[in-house]
Image (tube, helix red, strand yellow):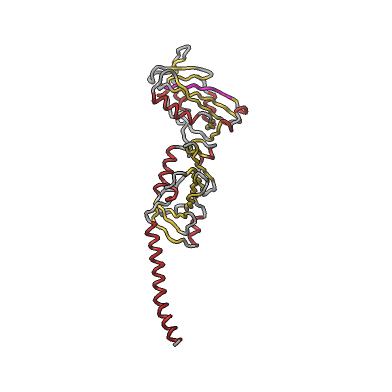
Amino acid sequence: MLLKHIKIALILLLFIIPLFAYAIYVNGTRIHLLSRGNYFFDLTRNRADITQIKFIFPDKTALHITKTDDFWRIKEADNYYAAFAKINALVNLIRSTVIYRADAIQEKELSLFSNPLKIISMDSSGNIVDEATIAPLKDGNKYYYALLNNDGFLYQLNSNFELSSHVMDWVQMPLFAFNVSHVKRIKTDDFEVYRRFDSENFKDVNSSEEYSHLQKFIDNFWYLSATEIKQATHFDIEKFSKLKHFSITLFNGIIYEINLYSLNGNYWISVHLSREGLISKSSLQQIKENGLLYDGWFFKIDPDKGAILSEFVL
């Protein structure tokens, strides 16, 4: 009788094992199907209180993008304003990254993540919302391998995670976007020139002598970018020598008041916007918006550009 029960149990076991294996396969396939096409950063994209995105790059460089007073700022740039285009691209990356497939991760697959990019989102209370680990894209691969929130799955993502670890690539730059055709008047500690139209040469305000070589001088401001940024409260101006003051008036009535400082071969500038007479509403708006980018900030510039500006004479 006992032998008969054992035989029945063995027969049932032979049926149960394949069914159990099939159930595991179906469940795994179901997870894969449910994951495919879903948004990878689903928790982050559905939260309105995300106030920090932290990157840890393969070289261990850390970059923090924090939201303060409704502005995104770069912590490593003394909390200067993040580039609008960069933030838009980052938001698009987080909102549009889609899962191509998801499988239970195997121990051997963890070796893919020896030099990863980490992306960590946090809420206003400092709690982690998503922690993603992105493996470097291997040659010939179309999809990035990724881990998310230690959930035990290996994801393949259809997106682009080629992000710069250079701090100054993330701040709002350049400092200036005007060129020689925009400039109406230039006043420095050494000279003052003006013109009525952009087709004219600049003239000395005292002698009316014409100068045709000021384009090279103005070109030093054209798309000038900072190499480092400090808040005024963190900049010990007493240690620096003030070399020159430049007042550059544009045809739209906006005036750029620029001070040049130096210390040990390094050059820094401060900028303040003002205006002349009556100007258009758009120019007034430009002063209001761009003033935030200048007031209370000091910018370190390329030493070659700094030397040229400090030594320039008519």
Q: What stretch is highlighted in magenta?
A: 242-250
The answer to whether residue 71 is above or below residue 26 is: above
Taking the spot 42% from the left edge, 24% from the top edge, the residue there is 284
Q: Position of residue 128 (x, y in %)?
A: 51, 49
In this rendering, the count of numbered labels is 0
Q: In this view, does 21 lie to the left or right of 265?
A: left
Q: Which residue lies furthest to the front in this view?
A: 1
Residue 247 located within the stretch drawn in magenta: yes
Residue 130 pos. (x, y %): 48, 50
Seen from the viewer's position, the closer of residues 17 and 133 is 17
Q: Which residue is drawn at 46% across and 45% down?
A: 163
Q: In which quarter of the image is residue 146?
A: bottom left
The one nearer the camera, 25 or 48, is 48
Picture quarter with the N terminus: bottom left
Q: Going 44% across and 37% down the picture, which residue do you hit?
A: 84
Would you say residue 214 sits in the magenta stretch? Answer: no
